[in-house]
Image (spheres, helix red, strand yellow):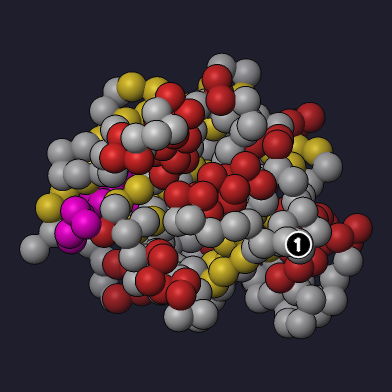
Amino acid sequence: MKFASIEIDTPISYADKRDGQLVVISRDESRCALVPRETALTLLDALERWEIVLPQLKLIGEDLERGRWQAVRDLALVVYKAPLPRTYQWLDGSAFIQHIILVRKARGVEPPKNITSDPLMYQGIGDYLDGPNSDIACLDHSHGLDLEGEVGVFLDETPLGVSPQDARSHVKLLALINDVSLRGLIPVELEKGFGFLQSKPSTSFAPFAVTPDELGDAWKDGRVHLDIECSLNGNVIGTPSAAEMHFSFDQLIAHAARTRRLSPGTFIGSGTISNQDRSRGVACLAERRMLEIIDARNAHPDAPELHQPSTPFLKPGDCVEIDMKIGGRSLFGRIKQKVIAAG
């Protein structure tokens, strides 16, 4: 099944404005069924009572397909929010080793010694999660605004100390995201020893959160075996495979739950999708810039003044698109965002 949250035409409360209306998406992705509030107020509410609510949502989906559901909207006319516009916890892993190596090189820092045995993870912003067409605000070009194409999972109640073997049973939905980063602010924050804060603004989500069965054989060993497609101003910059995760979602969930319970609605990201094969391109500009620096060093070893990237970070007017297809069809819907000047 596929779910989304859409803007309410006449919100009567702050919650209505923030959380929108939960809907079930038709199989042909032309229509959606509005989920009654008595069934689930929001997707977060549904995840908190998933075993009870999911059968009801399935019945709504069946009625939608048979033309028996009255509260229906044309998807061409709706405005999407993030599937879960706010949640209690958003944790981002960094499961693609190639990405860690390249961005650390860009900062002149060696990768952690335990890079292959202990996942990196930070706590992001869960109170404001943006929709697929939300503008990306560029406050200051020196901040180094960057896209990051990732996949991630929504969990139900996950116990303290869950094992990797049991972790996958807590994955209820998958999603596609643009984890926007401010590369110019990251080094200063990391030097403080407390991790990301200002360098990680709101994350943007593709329209649909989907149940694992929608992926078929592409969901196995705790990984999404599909390519992500990232474009900038209509030009594809990369199609790396998400299957190349070093750490699976099973391992990332167990890592996050090592010392705490994970509440329903917790979202865990894969980290920027990155492949060793350079022909697959990139899912963020920082990697492309690092590869340009490496090439310049190799071509001009005695001319450090030439060891500079040629690709700029995002600027106002740029358009970012991120998609992931299965059988030639968009799985999560497309992220399409414009960069605007803030202030």
Q: Where is residue 15, by image quadrant?
A: bottom left
Main secondary structure of the magenta stretch: loop
Between residue 184 and residue 149, name the one nearer to us: 184
Q: Is residue 201 magenta?
A: no
User: Which residue is at 53% across, 59% downward?
Assistant: 109
**Where the N terminus falls, by quadrant?**
top right
Q: Secondary structure at mark 1?
A: loop
Name the outermost residue toward the front. 302
List x then y, in percent, for residue 3: 54, 47
Q: Is residue 137 magenta?
A: yes
List x then y, in percent, for residue 90: 54, 67
Look at the image and tell me whether residue 206 can be seen.
no
341 lies above or below 121: above
Horizontal relation, residue 202 to residue 233: left or right: right
Q: What kind of residue is marked 1?
A: Asn
Between residue 70 and residue 286, name the one nearer to us: 286
Horizontal relation, residue 323 to residue 6: left or right: right
List x then y, in percent, for residue 43: 54, 61
List x then y, in percent, for residue 91: 58, 66
Residue of label 1: 114
Please give the range of residues in magenta.
130-142
Q: Where is residue 304, by image quadrant?
A: top left
10 lies above or below 190: above
Horizontal relation, residue 44 to residue 178: left or right: right
Look at the image and tell me whether residue 118 can be seen.
yes
User: Which residue is at 66% across, 76% downward?
Assistant: 263
User: Which residue is at 84% across, 76% downward?
Assistant: 161
User: Which residue is at 44% across, 33% downward?
Assistant: 301
Name the outermost residue toward the left. 343
160 lies above or below 172: below
